[in-house]
Image (spheres, grey):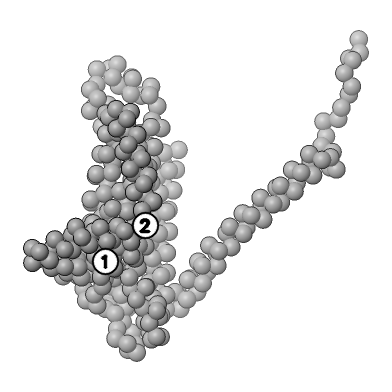
Amino acid sequence: MTSSFPERSLTRAPMSQRTLFNTVMTVVAFICGVLALVPLLAVLSYVIIQGFSSLSPSIFFELPPKALQQGGGFGNAILGTLLMVGIAALISIPFGVLAAIYITEFSSAQVARWVRFAANVLSGVPSIIAGVFAYGIVVLTLVKLNLGSYSALGGGFALAILMLPIIVRTTDEALQLVSQDLRQASVGLGATNFQTVSQVVLPAALPAIVTGATLAIARASGETAPLLFTALFSNFWPGSLFEPTASLAVLVYKYAISPFKNWQSLAWAASLILVLMVLITSIIARWATRKKA
């Protein structure tokens, strides 16, 4: 018995319209991918070339030099950056994670919708607005209390505002990805809502939460505008949380536009250190994601 359907070859016709269209679109997508990488590679290569030529062990332990003075470093800026990012993390991570837990596990749908909307709006606010807000809340308050003015505390508060929506959004999405079967199984075994969240849901979502926190830290490490309004800059080691504090981002801004070669050299070295800090945090985020897989 023969089939009434015509026999067709399963091999791809190299000159068919569908094959040609697929080939053209593949080439276009590859070219677009390469063009998207060109600016990144150009910036990274230029920063690495300029930064490595200016690196020396002394820059990590010495203070910024005077104009036209050889040597020196920006150890105070590295310490100030770590200090302010640490303050921002201590403020934003607990509040962000707890807010995400509330809207995901305990709040009504309407409250969760408004909180998510507020987090999305806050994530789009320019960083300079966060700096002006922190200036009005922290800096002016310290002046009224005679505790200082520009300070590491104000800088950390400004960076925390920028980190908060990132942490809320990533934690919220991580908690929503946890299977409902785990929650139902925990409740079925007699666990309370608090025990279910703390012992079942949070451990399952922890890698994604760590990823969001590290990405928020990476963004805060490179912010300049908020620190100009809150921490300002200093050529000395941080002495307390209530005095002007140096940071790598402000040092790059200040020294890169200066007419002095030694300061410009330090700006390139500080730029390289900032890039390496962002790279390290991104590697930590990828590592946490792989641990989840």
Q: Is residue 15 left or right of residue 244?
A: right
Instruction: Give the image quarter of residue 145.
Output: bottom left
- Determine whether, in the image, residue 157 is placed left or right of residue 67: left
Secondary element at image label 1: helix
Q: Amino acid at mark 1?
A: Phe
Q: Quadrant of the N terminus?
A: top right
- The answer to whether residue 109 shows anywhere in this view is yes
Label 2 crowd bin: few (<14), some (14–19), many (20+), radius 10 Å: few
Residue 199 lies, with reference to residue 235, above or below; the image says: above
Label placed on residue 183: none
Quadrant for the C terminus, please: top left
Q: Position of residue 183 (x, y in %)?
A: 33, 23
Q: Position of residue 56 (x, y in %)?
A: 38, 77
Provide the residue designation for mark 2: 126
Q: Residue at x 32, y 33 (%)?
A: 112
Q: Position of residue 180 (x, y in %)?
A: 38, 24
| Closer to the camera in the image, 207 or 124 | 124
Amino acid on which disc 2 is placed: Pro
- The residue most toward the bottom is 68
Q: Which mark is residue 229?
A: 1
Real-space CA distance between mark 2 and mark 1, rounded to the nearest whole angstrom: 14 Å
Residue at the far right in the pictured view:
2
Residue at left 29%, top 57%? 130
